[in-house]
Image: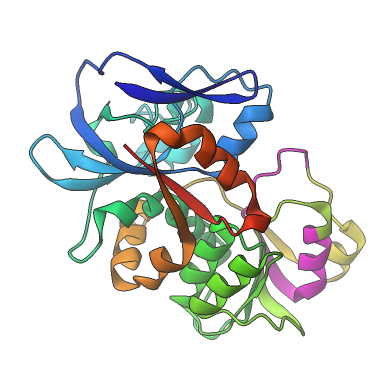
Amino acid sequence: MKAVRCNHGKVHLVEVERPKGEGVRVKVVSVGICGSDLHLLTSDVPVQSILGHEITGITGNGIPVAIEPIVPCGHCAYCVEGQYNHCDLGGFATTMGVGRDGGMTEEMIVPERCLVPLPSGLDIADAFLVEPLAVAIHGIIRAGVRSGDQVAIIGGGSIGLCAVAAARDITPHVALVARHDAQKSAGERLGARLNVWGSYDVVVDCAGTAAALAEAVGLCRPAGSLLLLANYWEGLTLPAFDLTSKEIRVVSANRYARHGGVRDVDLAASLLARNPAIAQSIITHRMPLNSAVEAFAVAANRSGGAIKVALEP
């Protein structure tokens, strides 16, 4: 069967054997290209696995599912507490598409615990967004966003737009700072306003740059909260004087886990089903697996209007 790997900074469509072993066999329906997939192409991380961690498919007995792409040990203190995103095995070893084979292929075998049943009304072709939406939901919960809070999101990529959707599910007062026209239009469709001014109870950085963090701190009210939801591949520089003088609470977030016994991925699936505008606004391109090289090029060209590109085997 066909699969997508990266090697020496390039995407390759390769032939691999069909998976074997214990678990649930899933026929992949769609898989999203994440910003971290693009970063892996130029990073020093030695990824030998099939790419793809935003996955949806159909089990062998015909059940549509999304996949939670973390495979933790299940018995360390973090796993027992529901914080399996901090499993003792480490993020590299437990994540599909990085340390384990991911979903940019035709079939995969996953542990049963990774299956996310889809609510009625959620189109399986859109359900790969469960993963990035769970990232946003996890962060929004950790930041303690409440009804009536003023929230600003910095960065209009897929995580930023998922953060808009997650925040708007709690409070109507959400603003978005985005660079590209397609991102701005998507943000407005999700209920964000673009005229960002004043101060905010919670500011969410989804851009991951020094300039974005400076803007985020500037927008945050005294004693407000700054949520770090981006990937800081090049390190982190904070405007410490303004941060400390305002006594801003800094909150970090890493992937997703459980809150109160409920998985973030299940909350994400429910929100996607309740709000079809999320998929309609964020998914901009669908391309066949055979066009993986072109799809990655499209995904990398944000100024060309791409937000989320899906590969469909």
Residue lying at the far right in this picture: please name it.
241
Residue 157 occupies quadrant: bottom right
Name the residue: 72% across, 51% down: 208
Seen in the image, is 2 located left or right of residue 243? left
Q: Position of residue 181 (x, y in %)?
A: 65, 69
Q: Is residue 214 magenta?
A: yes
Q: Position of residue 9 (x, y in %)?
A: 65, 24
* Residues rendered magenta in the picture: 212-235
Q: Position of residue 191 (x, y in %)?
A: 51, 80
Residue 187 occupies quadrant: bottom right
Image vertical order of residue 164 relative to residue 32, above or below: below
Which quadrant is the C terminus positioned in? Answer: top left
Name the residue: 57% across, 74% down: 185
Image vertical order of residue 237 relative to residue 227, above or below: above
Front position in the image: 187 or 11: 11
Seen in the image, is 4 located left or right of residue 157? left
Which quadrant is the N terminus positioned in? Answer: top left
Name the residue: 57% across, 51% down: 253
